[in-house]
């Protein structure tokens, strides 16, 4: 794996998951910008909830860790051609620019591995499925550590 | 088309090392064919902000305090390390308020990074100086601040970030 390219090249990531329903446009979206800014938005109108938006600058070390997670997943080798199309239940979008590669994948929501196995591209979709969880996990940790008071 | 078509915007890119052949960028995905961002509208919500002011360049940054303390990132953590290992090692440098040791969702082992919250700047700084580049289970770990007060640049100059931002909004 070309470590230098991954470490030094261009980097951008955006993930979106959401749907439109009786509580309006409910979605979660986060973005790692090339300059290190992490942006996070979470919206639901459930019980008149309002949108949560958070932004903070990360250090190059955090971006590097994010790159590592992506390159180890090998998501850049996949293609969304045979993935389920976004539907009424919802859509997911994953856009990544890393080195000289640019992907922008869209698919439906994935409830569980059952959806992955029953799709036409289980191997590719499984990579997407786990990568998204790992990225969310990283972002939730960063956002909650930076902004949230620790629950007692 | 509103996709971030980087191949179009590289004329003014200042490259210090070998020029990267952006014209050969490999692009994949329905999102790009549909015009970048699909049909979702949420991007407006993320993108309605003004650009940040540019800093002075260089890779230096100023660490940023988080709500309850100072967050330190440890990377290169062995997948079988335990919470206690981290707490013992890093607890030697100061009081740890909080530790996130996230798991790889597929394997169930550690993902490879830890986020540690120290209450005091001095303790966090001591952990970074004392632990960065050391070994944990025969693996070299990197220890650094997680958050900074502003954008980072260095190799990736703002000349790249700028048009990118414009393309998004």
Image (spheres, rainbow, N blue to C red):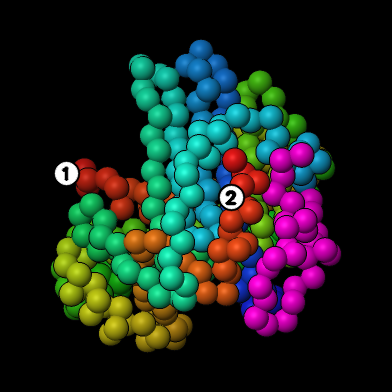
Residue name at image x 77 percent, y 56 percent: B8
| Nearer mark to the viewer, of 1 and 2 | 2
Q: In the image, is residue B15 part of the stretch drawn in magenta?
A: yes
Where residue B114 appears, x then y in whole percent?
Answer: 38, 65
In this orientation, does residue B77 appear? Answer: no
Alpha carbon separation for disc pair 1 and 2: 39 Å
> At x 18% / y 74%, what residue is drawn?
B122
Quarter of the image containing the N terminus of chain A? bottom right
- The residue that mark 1 highlights is A152
Could you tell me if residue A93 is visible in this image? yes
The part of the chain drawn in magenta is: B1-28
**Dot 1 lies on which element?**
loop
Per the image, the residue denoted by label 2 is B165
- Circle 1 marks a residue in which chain? A
Q: Which quadrant would residue B23 be assigned to in this image?
A: bottom right
- Tag 1–tag 2 contact (CB < 8 Å): no
Give percent across and percent down for residue B70.
25, 63
Secondary structure of residue under mark 2: helix
B105 and B119: which is toward the camera: B119
- Magenta stretch: dominant secondary structure: loop
State whether residue B122 is above or below residue B96: below
Tell me if residue B11 is in the magenta stretch. Answer: yes
- Same chain letter for marks 1 and 2: no
At 81% from the left edge and 41% from the top edge, which residue is drawn?
A: B33
């Amino acid at each position: 794996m070309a470590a230098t390219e991954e470490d030094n090249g261009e980097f951008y990531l955006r993930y979106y998951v959401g749907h439109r329903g009786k509580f309006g446009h409910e979605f979660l979206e986060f973005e790692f910008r090339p300059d290190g800014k992490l942006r996070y938005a979470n919206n639901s109108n459930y019980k008149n909830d309002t949108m949560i938006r958070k932004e903070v600058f990360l250090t190059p070390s955090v971006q590097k860790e994010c790159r590592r997670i992506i390159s180890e997943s090998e998501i850049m080798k996949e293609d969304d051609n045979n993935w389920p199309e976004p539907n009424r239940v919802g859509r997911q979008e994953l856009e990544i620019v890393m080195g000289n590669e640019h992907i922008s994948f869209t698919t439906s929501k994935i409830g569980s591995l059952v959806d992955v196995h029953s799709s036409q591209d289980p191997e590719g979709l499984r990579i997407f499925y786990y990568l998204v969880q790992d990225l969310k996990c990283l972002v939730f940790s960063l956002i909650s550590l930076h902004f949230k008071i620790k629950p007692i | 088309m509103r996709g971030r078509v980087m191949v179009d915007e590289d004329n003014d890119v200042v490259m210090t090392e070998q020029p990267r052949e952006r014209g050969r960028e490999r692009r994949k995905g329905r999102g790009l064919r549909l015009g970048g961002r699909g049909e979702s509208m949420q991007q407006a919500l993320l993108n309605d902000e003004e650009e940040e002011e540019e800093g002075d360049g260089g890779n230096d940054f100023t660490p940023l305090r988080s709500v309850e303390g100072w967050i330190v990132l440890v990377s290169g953590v062995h997948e079988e390390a335990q919470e206690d290992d981290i707490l013992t090692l890093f607890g030697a440098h100061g009081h740890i308020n909080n530790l996130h040791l996230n798991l790889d969702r597929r394997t169930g082992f550690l993902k490879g990074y830890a986020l540690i919250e120290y209450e005091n700047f001095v303790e966090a700084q001591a952990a970074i100086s004392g632990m960065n580049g050391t070994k944990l289970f025969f693996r070299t770990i990197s220890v650094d601040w997680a958050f900074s007060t502003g954008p980072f640049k260095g190799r990736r100059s703002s000349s790249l970030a700028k048009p990118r931002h414009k393309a998004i909004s």
